[in-house]
Amino acid sequence: MKATTVLAAAALIASGVAGCASMEAMPAASPGHELHTFVPGWERFFTVDWQAGQRNGRPILSGAVHNQYGATATRVQLLVEGLDDKGGVVSQRVVWLGDSIEPYDTAYFNVPVGPAANYRVIIIAYDWGGRASGV
């Protein structure tokens, strides 16, 4: 009876591992499942500059987010998308930018990415902290 229980448990574990492994094989962004910004209009408060490059032979995006508003931006998250040659999303990755970006300050990022024809970087989420003095 114990052998049957052990075999049943092993079968459940194996099927769970196989299920997890199959999730890895799925594309990061399938049609209808792409992520979008939670904060439309973020462009009024921030600018994002980036360039594609390589580090240790692997693609990377290096760039900066500029806070153009008189309040501290906290919990800033970037959405980094890999695009095909027609502009379709082939991969997505959400990246925390750091603790905060002070008013009128800049935060820098380096994000490893997969190969793609082009990339897009947008702000997907952020909160506001305290205001700068005199604002």
Image: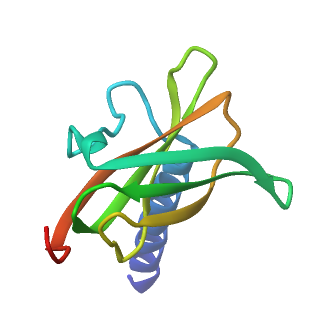
- How far from the left and from the top, in percent, is residue 15? 47, 57
| Between 71 and 119, the one nearer to me in the picture | 71
Name the residue rendered at 46%, 68% in the picture.
Answer: 13
Query: In which quadrant of the rendered image does the N terminus lie?
Result: bottom left
User: Among all residues in the image, which is located at the extreme right?
Assistant: 57
Where, quadrant-wise, is the C terminus in this rendering? bottom left
Residue 84: horizontal and vertical position, in percent? Answer: 60, 23
Task: Please state if 51 lies on the left or on the right of 66 as rendered.
Answer: right
Q: Is residue 22 above or below residue 67?
A: above
Q: Nearer the viewer, residue 16 or 23?
A: 23
Q: Is residue 83 above or below residue 113?
A: above
Residue 125 place in picture, x, y as percent = 27, 54
As drawn, 38 above or below 55: above
The residue shown at (41%, 53%) is: 78
**Residue at screen point 49% across, 41% down:** 28
Q: How many labels, in total? A: 0
- What residue is shown at x 22% (from left), y 38% (from top)? 41
Q: Quadrant of residue 69?
A: bottom left
Q: Is residue 27 visible?
A: no
In the image, residue 21 above or below residue 85 = below
Question: How far from the left and from the top, in percent, is residue 52?
Answer: 69, 44
Q: Is residue 35 left or right of residue 18?
A: left
In the image: residue 125, left or right of residue 90: left
Residue that extends furthest to the top in the rendered view of this protein: 86
20 vs 69, nearest the viewer: 69
Whether residue 105 is visible to the viewer of this picture, yes or no, is yes
